[in-house]
Image (tube, helix red, strand yellow):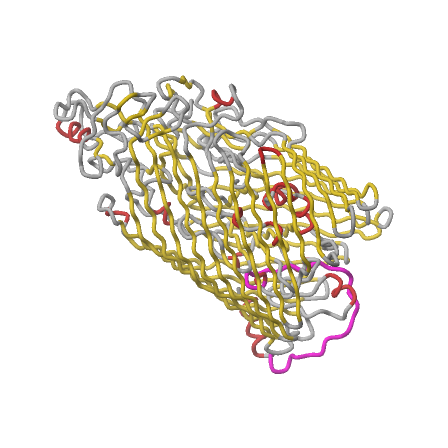
């Protein structure tokens, strides 16, 4: 911090006299990366996708020293790992309509966990940290699009299915950089989009394939003088590979730009809607009979998004520039979920209520001795009531269920402002950035349950005149709750979030080869919630979280093809409103359907260490380029937040802080490219462990002791494979015909809920993919894609649930529930470029290392 303060003071004090003329030199080809969100939001990206508000590779290679802007730095000066996926790589996976699949295919240390049974809503696990669209998953990655944080207001969820993949210019995954603010525990995912200055032409794509998938898209870009326009719209529909699991997605992205030699501005709009069905894991007893099986349904998720954003950059002088953005974001999501229930006839000892429905008390600690007045009062508090406080009669032999509906709406707005200076200090290069951000969101959350019955086909219906069960009184009763509002109650919460940050970083060239980076960020969070029902008054409250996160690192460039780096940083994340409102084990939530009282949670803090080498060897074997990297990392977390289950219903749970967890590991990667061939291979060892002694709740774990499991230091964090291996190639077989293949292999991992590591693991697995394209004419291309080429039956997600008889018909003896991966799928389509076809998107010379 002293070095940072000194360099900042020197930078400001020497500003009047430091506008030194830059010498004209010819530089080798270098990758440039944005190291701040505002730098990434900016403008002037090169077609080859390496300049965040900076020049293209070609400019760097052929011009005198370029004008880097914002937080952009040459990769060899960044003291941490950077992984990049380019538009050209995403284009090869067009059939998936999913940029996340491309990210997982090539990025070391990154795997996907599919708890939903839909490849458009998967959890991203990077080095043991998650970014997920699923409410309730602890989020450890900050995600930005054009400089705007897109972790949603209520649960910090990330919905990458709302971004058209063909509109993405590049995706960078950056580690150990607290400048990216809250949630950047394991790093940040930085998405930069195309605009009319970086992409011109008109292109239409149409595709089809397995599971009745039909999709298409249009992108158009044009520059007229100082103005530009870019439009991208796409749509996708399929029936899914599991029962009752259709997908419908529609997305629009547009950008209007204006620039002069010393400024650039963009007005951006992003609008999307998605509908997904049958999003849940399935008991293994069911999938052994039919891999397409699901559990109770409906389970539909409808998401809508509208975003308007303004970005701009102005050169204040030859060495100072000012960049910023402002945005307005509207998010809405409705989840309809048919669930098994824990309703039973009230105890015969309760003469006043016998013959009516009560809520099973397995998930709660009874009050008082058996037979005591306190125990009777406790049981009375579990009697089931409707919205009008009416008792609900019990019918023997009926498989009761609930139709649970949740709706989240959020309106967010805010902006960022950043100044960057590149004055030389005492003749040495220096890059100084100072900035701030403010993000405000108002949200509402509603949930309610309607009494239903589980039919033989496992659908949950609320019509009292059900055919399978005859007339059932009480079905269709809405607003279900217990008299004591325990476990099940309607919720309605209003709230607001205020996140503010101030940051500064400075990269100073101590010598021509040695660079020092130092800086930090101040994070402030205020989270307010107000209960609107009266059932959960303790939800009402305001919570404040503040932390200063420093960063310091060194890079040393031995040769143009070999660099060494090392860094230390800290980061934090504030508990989400959902976590704060569901942290009491005596009042668990039907996730994500209920909010109840909370003891306050602490914020999660992390200490991050990283060292590595990277570089490239030009003219390697037939004039190819060999890029390579080796890195080691460690992340020590305090007060990490876990989601735990309670007895009786696998969907019900709560959140707790645990003392300490750790992620550490090693990554090794290499890539060889030449004109007709590209080959890559990488390996990651990720050791994610708990670092405390304690007791956790896992009632459905077969080895639990009365619902409790014991965790000791060294126990593995579930769902994170220790070993990951990825290899692939693309080869130009004939002029215009490209063929590629990729293999991903992962070791075994523990089920969620097995933090004590006593059960057998999810098996190790591999998946093989194939892609090909043929350029029929300069305008027409046909392409094909095969996923899971060997039709391997594997799973990336597993947990436990309560065994028993479902719908009075299906005995379930195995407590394991999993989501099988998508089977062999084949897609094909065509891409047509009108007029003079734009040249293919080229990849950076140093793409990943």
Q: Which residues are magenta?
A: 15-39
Residue 685 is one of the magenta-drawn residues = no
Is any atom of residue 62 visible in this view? yes
Task: Please say if 372 is above or below 447.
Answer: above
32 is within the stretch colored magenta? yes
Which residue is at the front of the view, 239 or 309?
239
Of residues 287 and 437, the one drawn nearer to the viewer in this rendering: 287
Residue with the most extreme right position: 622
Q: Is residue 816 left or right of residue 461?
A: right
Nearest to the observer: residue 261 or residue 227: 227
Residue 145, how many percent across, how many down?
54, 56
**Residue that appears at 42% across and 40% down:** 642
Residue 369, by quadrant, is top left
Instruction: Identify the residue at image location x=36%, y=38%.
Output: 654
Question: At which x and y percent is residue 142?
Answer: 51, 52
Residue 121 in the image: above or below residue 285: below
Position of 606 with respect to 94 (left or right) is left
In which quarter of the view is residue 454 placed? top left
* Residue 641 image position (x, y, % from top left): 42, 43
Give the residue at x 59% y 77%: 316
Count of marks placed on residues = 0
Depth check: give the residue in front, 42 or 807.
Answer: 807
Q: Quadrant of residue 505?
A: bottom right
Magenta stretch: dominant secondary structure: loop
Q: Is residue 556 visible?
A: no
> From the viewer's perspective, is residue 337 above or below residue 506?
above
- Position in image of residue 299 (x %, y %): 42, 35
């Amino acid at each position: 911090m002293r070095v940072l303060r000194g360099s900042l003071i020197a930078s400001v004090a020497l500003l009047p006299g430091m506008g030194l003329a830059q010498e004209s030199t010819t530089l080798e080809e270098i990758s440039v990366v944005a190291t701040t969100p505002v730098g990434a939001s900016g403008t002037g990206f090169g077609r080859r996708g390496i300049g965040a508000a900076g020049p293209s590779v070609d400019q760097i290679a052929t011009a005198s020293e370029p004008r880097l802007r914002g937080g952009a730095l040459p990769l060899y000066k960044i003291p941490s790992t950077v992984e990049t996926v380019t538009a050209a790589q995403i284009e090869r996976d067009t059939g998936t309509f999913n940029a996340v699949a491309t990210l997982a295919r090539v990025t070391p240390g990154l795997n996907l966990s599919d708890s939903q049974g839909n490849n458009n809503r998967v959890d991203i696990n990077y080095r043991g940290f998650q970014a997920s669209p699923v409410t309730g998953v602890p989020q450890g990655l900050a995600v930005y699009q054009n400089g705007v944080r897109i972790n949603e207001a209520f649960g910090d969820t990330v919905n990458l299915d709302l971004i058209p993949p063909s509109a993405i210019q590049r995706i960078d995954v950056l580690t150990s950089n607290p400048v990216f603010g809250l949630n950047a525990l394991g790093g940040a995912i930085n998405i930069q989009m195309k605009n009319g200055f970086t992409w011109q032409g008109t292109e239409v794509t149409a595709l089809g394939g397995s599971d009745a998938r039909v999709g298409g898209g249009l992108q158009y870009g044009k520059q007229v003088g100082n103005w530009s326009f870019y439009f991208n719209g796409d749509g996708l529909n399929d029936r899914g590979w599991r029962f009752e699991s259709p997908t419908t997605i529609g997305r629009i992205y547009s950008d209007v730009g204006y620039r002069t030699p010393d400024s650039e501005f963009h007005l951006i709009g992003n609008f999307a809607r998605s509908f997904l069905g049958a999003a849940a894991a399935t008991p293994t007893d069911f999938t052994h009979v039919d891999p397409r099986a699901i559990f109770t349904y409906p389970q539909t998720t409808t998401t809508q998004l509208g975003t308007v954003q303004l970005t701009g950059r102005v050169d204040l002088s030859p060495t100072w520039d000012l960049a910023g953005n402002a945005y307005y974001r509207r998010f809405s999501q409705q989840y309809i979920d048919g669930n098994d229930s824990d309703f039973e006839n009230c105890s015969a000892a309760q003469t006043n209520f016998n013959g009516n429905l009560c809520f099973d008390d397995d998930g709660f600690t009874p009050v008082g001795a058996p037979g005591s007045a306190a125990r009777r009062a406790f049981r009375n508090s579990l009697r089931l009531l409707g919205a009008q406080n009416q008792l609900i009669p019990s019918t023997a032999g009926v498989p009761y269920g609930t139709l649970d509906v949740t709706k989240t709406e959020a309106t967010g707005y805010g902006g960022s402002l950043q100044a960057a200076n590149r004055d030389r200090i005492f003749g040495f290069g220096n890059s100084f950035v100072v900035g701030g951000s403010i993000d405000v969101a108002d949200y509402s959350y509603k949930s309610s349950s309607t009494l239903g019955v589980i039919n033989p086909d496992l659908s949950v219906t609320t019509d009292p005149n059900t055919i399978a069960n005859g007339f059932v009184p009480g079905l269709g009763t809405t607003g279900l709750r217990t008299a004591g509002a325990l476990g099940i109650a309607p919720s309605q919460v209003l709230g607001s979030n205020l996140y503010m940050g101030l940051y500064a970083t400075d990269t100073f060239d101590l010598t021509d080869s040695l660079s020092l980076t130092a800086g930090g960020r101040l994070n402030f969070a205020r989270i307010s919630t107000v209960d609107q029902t009266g059932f959960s008054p303790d939800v009402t409250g305001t919570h404040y979280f503040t932390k200063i996160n420093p960063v310091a690192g060194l890079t040393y460039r031995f040769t143009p093809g070999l660099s060494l780096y090392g860094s230390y940083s800290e980061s934090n994340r504030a508990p989400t409103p959902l976590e704060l409102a569901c942290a009491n084990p005596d009042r668990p939530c039907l996730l994500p359907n209920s909010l109840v009282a909370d003891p306050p949670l602490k914020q999660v803090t992390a200490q991050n260490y990283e060292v590595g080498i990277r570089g490239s060897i030009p003219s390697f074997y037939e004039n190819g380029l060999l890029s390579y990297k080796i890195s080691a990392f460690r992340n020590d977390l305090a007060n990490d937040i876990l989601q735990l289950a309670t007895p009786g219903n696998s969907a019900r749970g709560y959140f707790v802080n645990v003392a300490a967890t750790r992620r550490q590991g090693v990554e090794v990667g290499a890539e060889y490219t030449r004109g007709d061939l590209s080959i890559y291979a990488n390996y990651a060892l990720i050791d994610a462990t708990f670092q405390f002694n304690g007791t956790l709740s896992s009632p459905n774990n077969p080895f639990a002791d009365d619902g409790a499991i014991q965790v000791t230091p060294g126990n593995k964090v579930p769902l994170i494979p220790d070993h990951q291996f990825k290899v692939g190639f693309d080869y130009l077989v004939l002029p215009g015909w490209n063929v590629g293949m990729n293999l991903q292999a992962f070791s075994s991992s523990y089920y969620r809920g097995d933090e004590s590591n006593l059960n057998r693991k999810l098996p190790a697995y591999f998946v093989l993919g194939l892609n090909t394209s043929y350029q029929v004419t300069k305008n027409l291309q046909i392409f094909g894609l095969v996923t899971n080429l060997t039709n391997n039956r594997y799973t990336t997600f597993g947990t436990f649930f309560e065994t028993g008889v479902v719908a009075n018909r299906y005995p379930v003896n195995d407590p394991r529930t999993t989501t099988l991966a998508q089977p062999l799928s084949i897609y094909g389509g065509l891409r047509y470029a009108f007029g003079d076809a734009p040249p293919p998107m080229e990849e950076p010379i140093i793409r990943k290392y």
